[in-house]
Image (cartoon, rainbow, N blue to C red):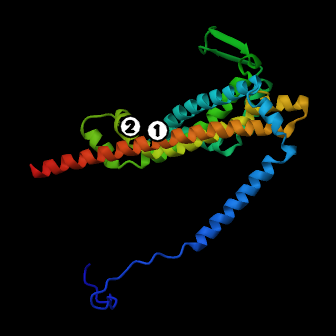
Amino acid sequence: MPHDPKFIAPAVPDGKMLTYVPASAWGSRIAGTLLLLVALYFFASVAGNPNFGWAVVWQYLFDPRILWGLYLTVWLTVVTMVIGVVLGTIFAIMAMSDNIVISGVANAYIWFFRGTPVLVQLIFWYNLGALFPDLSIGIPFTTWWVSMPTNTLIAPVTAAILGLGLNEGAYMSEIIRSGLLSVDPGQRQAARSLGMTDGKATWSIILPQAMPVIIPPTGNQTIGMLKTSSLVSVISLSDLLYSAQTIYSRNFQTIPLLIVACLWYLFATTLLSLAQVRIERHFARSRHQHGGKVSRLMFRQKGA
């Protein structure tokens, strides 16, 4: 221990040693016991309450309509997250551009889709036919044009993908941009000194190093998207919640069917949380191994 003039060693009788006396844990034990009793009382009151309709819950837990809604919910989550990650990466790079037009377009996209509720966006896309009865595509100033009714193209599934995907892209762009900014600017300068273009440096050097920062919030966004997808029930898309609503609108067992939906949402989010933990550990281990290799290489270079 370094000498400190303010430090005064405790007086110890000759031939005796100081012994460590742990602090009393009775307070935490009593609090833990009380919390356990409250939790047991809560679960017992819920399990024993006939108003929850547990028999109906077990009856419809594996109903084909519920399972189809679960499948559609998971599928919609995967598709919208893929779109969100792709758009987020593109607009994050655009927002960091030195070109004021490119960065302005990216920031306008982020501002609009982050500033309006996703429910409003879903309803807007679902009713796009009221604004544009027909959608056309072709070559300007020529007769090569193809036109189709908007209601034919914008089905409930398409409206859900557009609403959720575009909204998620705005949030993912900020997550990816923060990850890119977390990388040392010297990495990009080193890449330029090796003759790499900005695009190649971003994809090959900057983005892989930013992944440990990007992965955790992306996992949270995925779990949030799984739950946010329940909003598509307002446009009559047969996801998990809408399937439960369809059933209890006929048998009037509202609470049991909502419990069924909650159980499947909890199951799906638990699996996603476990996957997120494994992915985070993988990238953290890879970063530590990469850092160790770099340190050993520098040490060898210094030793040489």
Q: Please rate how many residues cluster around mark 2, counting C-alpha atoms within 10 Å: few if below 14, some from 14 to 19, many from 20.
A: some
The answer to whether residue 20 is above or below residue 159 is below
Helix, strand or loop at label 1? It is: helix
Q: Nearer the viewer, residue 253 or 10?
A: 10
- Residue 94 in sight from this viewpoint: yes
Percent of width and height locating residue 289: 31, 44
In the rendered view of the protein, which quadrant contains the N terminus?
bottom left
Horizontally, residue 243 falls left or right of residue 13, namely right
Residue placed at 41% from the left, 42% from the top?
283
Residue placed at 60% from the left, 73% from the top?
27
Q: Which residue is mark 2?
A: 202
Horizontally, residue 83 falls left or right of residue 97, namely right
Separation of marks 2 and 1 at Cα, in angstroms? 9 Å
Helix, strand or loop at label 2? It is: helix
| Figure quadrant of residue 136 | top right
Q: Looking at numbered disc 1 in the image, what kind of residue is underneath it?
A: Ile
Q: Residue furthest left?
A: 304
Q: Looking at numbered disc 2 in the image, what kind of residue is underneath it?
A: Thr
Percent of width and height locating residue 147: 70, 12
- Label placed on residue 93: 1
